Image (cartoon, rainbow, N blue to C red):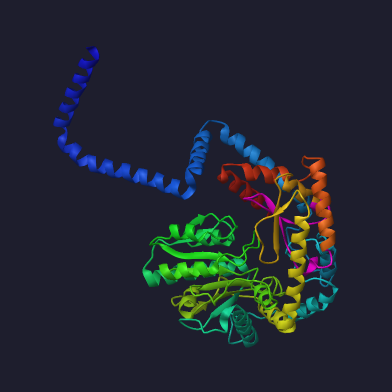
Amino acid sequence: MEIFSLLTHFRTSTNSFFSQYEPLVLILAPIFSLFIARFLHSILTVVLENGIKSTLIASFMYMIKLIPGVNRYLDAEKQKVVDKLQSGNKSKRDGWRTELPASGLGSRVIEMMKEEKRKDVAWQGKCSGTVYIGGTEFEGHFSLINEACSMFAHTNPLHLDVFQSVVHYEAEVVAMTAALLGGKEKASGGQICGNMTSGGTESIVLAVKSSRDYMKTKKGIKNPEMIIPLSAHSAYDKAAQYFNIKLRRVPVNSEFQADVRAIRRSINKNTILIVGSAPGYPHGIIDPITELGQLAMSFGVCLHVDLCLGGFVLPFARKLGYPIPPFDFSVQGVTSISVDVHKYGLAPKGTSVVLYRNHEIRKHQFVAVTEWSGGLYVSPTIAGSRPGGLIAGAWAAMMSLGEEGYLENTRQIMEVSKKIQEGIKGIPELFVVGRPDMTIVAFASNIVDIFEVNDLMSSKGWHLNALQRPNSLHICVTLQHVSVVDDFLKDLQESVQKVKENPGPISGGLAPIYGAAGRMPDRVMVQELLVNFMDGTC
């Protein structure tokens, strides 16, 4: 009875309150409802973008960090990891110069540089990717591109009226590259065009910027979004941050390719760009570019294909008879392509090309300034001044090798790649990740800690790339590996056996850090670790 009386009293009081303040309630109710709706929409958006698990973990970590002393403890632990990653770097920097010498050293600097160069790691034949020219027969190629770079070291294509030679070279590098990638066929909507850049990242960033501005003009999109598979290069993350573009990341399929259906589900009215790779950097697997092209055309969005690794291999591999699926401008729907000349094009470091299906899209890459007191200004790339020597070096590399040279190089590295795949399959504890289409072979294990294997390989002088999702390693095969492929497989098998027989990280190895980072659920903390590491290294 007492409970009934209390409830009756509460109802009467409530009715009295609402009767007394009804006008205020009528005003505040819609505002409050709108606030609740927006709050729930924000939560739902975060959950849909990051997943329930990641959202719950992020919320839990946020609350944990509110406890007094927890942040201090976490910062101290993060610093321990950073110190471990940077071990040895700080002592090396102790003797580094911080001021100009009082008197110039003249030609003595060359001897000093030679001495410093001797401290570099012995990379010949032991690095994944990194240096793509290989073998004693290529010493002449090194000399050739060095001479070309030196001859034009003073030039800058920004001053196109002065240095017409490097302007000419850039145009021919772009045209020759476009011809390899479907440029011989008449592109719908205009002629394939492009520019040289400083590397794959700048090529990708420019393609994203151009796509954003092109889609704003074409569709009026003011809140741009782009969709990338998990395997897409981290340059897209840079572009998203630089240009305020929302990034939607979708999983790959069971074959480690871009999942076309997942991308289709993510396309909305704000989508400006979808992405494919040929091949993807982690596993050397070509995404289904034809299907992505059809998707891009049906939704009227741009499609960028990352050919930074494959641009100077896949066209020649196809001519050699390898079953290479469509990947370039021959696929309708592809609007831009990035391709590095400084990788398998064997040009000097710092040379890449970004290509567009037509001039209408490329025009959005340029920056033109009309109100500067310094005069009228227009620049095609992120850099204003650009090193003409590198452009000349790229032209010299392509002209000196020619189609026959690239065909022979591709034959060698594709054969070595297949040999490495077969060798890995012969090690019972390892398996190849997916089915590589090109010269990148990723491998993992369900039996041994693959990062401990990596540490042992490092102790033998090999420099491989550590991957995640799944935890694995890869080797990007270059001409450097042609003569040492048997040594690589022998060292790999020995390292696997040693880890299997003596599990546990080797002293000074980074396996615990790689493993911990892969298992750490709070990805913000991992991001902070990486930033702190870079901040202490630069």
Residue 204 lies in what quarter of the image? Answer: bottom right
> Is residue 121 one of those drawn in magenta?
no
Counting from the top left corner in percent of width and height, residue 58 is at 51, 41
Q: For this view, does 3 lie left or right of residue 355?
A: left
Does residue 88 appear in the picture of this structure?
no
Q: How many marks?
A: 0
Q: For this view, does 457 lie left or right of residue 516?
A: right
The segment highlighted magenta reads: 457-484
Counting from the top left corner in percent of width and height, residue 44 is at 40, 46
**Above or below for 531 versus 210:** above
Does residue 134 appear in the picture of this structure?
yes
Outermost residue to the left: 19
Q: Residue at x 14, y 31 (%)?
A: 19
Counting from the top left corner in percent of width and height, residue 282 is at 64, 58
Q: Residue at x 59, y 82 (%)?
A: 159
Q: Quadrant of the N terminus?
A: top left
**Above or below for 514 versus 331:** above
Nearest to the observer: residue 177 or residue 279: 279
Nearest to the observer: residue 219 or residue 495: 495
> Is residue 458 one of those drawn in magenta?
yes
